[in-house]
Each structure stands twice: as structure tokens, then as C-alpha cells.
Image (cartoon, helix red, strand yellow):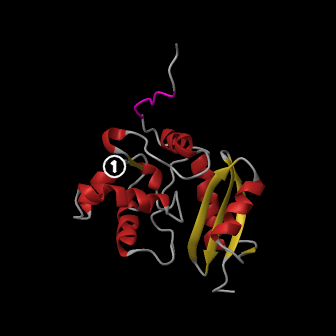
Amino acid sequence: MAGQSQYQLFETAAGVAAIGWAGAGVTALRLPAPTAAETERAMSRRLPGAIRTAPPAGIAAVIDAAIGYFAGERTEFFAVAVDPGEQPPFFARVYDHVRTLGWGETTTYGAVARALDAGPEHARAVGQAMAANPVPLIIPCHRVLAAGGAIGGFSAPGGALSKARMLALEGVALTPVQQGFDF
């Protein structure tokens, strides 16, 4: 079954998450959603034909680390083997760079572009790579912010609010975002 995509759901303090793998590499991670059904549907779309099964020891360790992360434990995922599948070369470079960001460390889309010698005009492409990230948390796209430290977008369940909560778990103070006007 080494080549067959497999996955498993797991409960966290933030909701029901899921992990997908093929062989020893993590191929997908679904951040917590309110219901198992929502998470299951997302994994079916991401990994069509994957089999839900008990994870091997290495994947179980990643699940335990993710559960700890959402419980507020300082957790790093640097050593986790990932297989994000076929990606545009620039996206692969972005993912490699973002994986170097540790607990509570943030950067901006433009800074990632500059770090890759791509120039700030490629900030939008960095954002596109983050939106397409198949293994969020392990490739910590939540740590990449918009210019000026604004939260920016987030395509996970709960959107930007989930991103803000993840950063708050890591002790990152964000500039408050005005949600509306109080007349």
C-alpha cells in the first residue's frame, strides 16, 4: 500500500482535522473544521480514492504533534517528511523557505519573494502558493502575513480568524482588524 493514498481524521482542541499520506510522506493536512463530515468531504476532494486507515507510527507521531499544537504546546514540524505532489517550481521554493519559519516567527508575502530573489512584485505568487499549500501547519503558511503585518487571506476552515487564532497560540500579537463600524 506504499503508493496508495491514505488518510485519517483526528480530533483537536480546535475541531476535526485530517492527515493524508502516501508511503512515509505527508501529502495533505486539513486544518480543523467544526465537523467530521466537513473534514471528510475536504479530504475526499483533496485525495480522491484515498483509503481511511490507521496511520503508521511516523504519521501517528505527526497527528500527536498537531493535537499538541492546537492544545497550545510549542510544536515544530521541521523534521516531518512531506510530499506536496507536483507543484510549480516557484511554489516548491516558497514551501521550502516557509518551512524554515519556527514557532511564533512571521514574515510577509513580499519578504518571502525577496528572500527567493524574486522581487516584491512576486508577493502575489507567494500568496497563491500559500493558498494552494496542501500541508498547512507543516508548511506553516499561517506565519506569512500581508504587508504591514496585516493578517491577509487564509483558505482554511474559518478563514482569517483561524489564522489569527493559530498565531495567537504561538504568542504572535497582531494588529487588530476592524470588523465593522459601530454607529
Which of 63/92 is in front?
Answer: 92
The residue depicted at 42 percent of the width and 34 percent of the height is 173
Residue 77 pos. (x, y %):
49, 61
Residue 12 pos. (x, y %):
68, 50
- Amino acid bearing label 1: Thr
- Residue 160 drawn above or below residue 76: above
- Residue 44 drawn above or below residue 73: below
- Residue 153 drawn above or below residue 84: above
The residue depicted at 29 percent of the width and 52 percent of the height is 110
Name the outermost residue toward the front: 183
Magenta segment includes 178:
yes
User: Magenta span covers which residues?
Assistant: 174-179
* Magenta stretch, main secondary structure class: loop
Residue 89 pos. (x, y %):
36, 75
* Residue on which disc 1 sits: 108
User: Residue 172, located in which quarter of the rendered image?
Assistant: top left
The residue depicted at 61 percent of the width and 72 percent of the height is 58
Residue 88 pos. (x, y %):
40, 74
Magenta segment includes 44:
no
Which quadrant of the figure contains the N terminus?
A: bottom right
Give the left or right position of residue 125, taking residue 63 as reference.
Answer: left
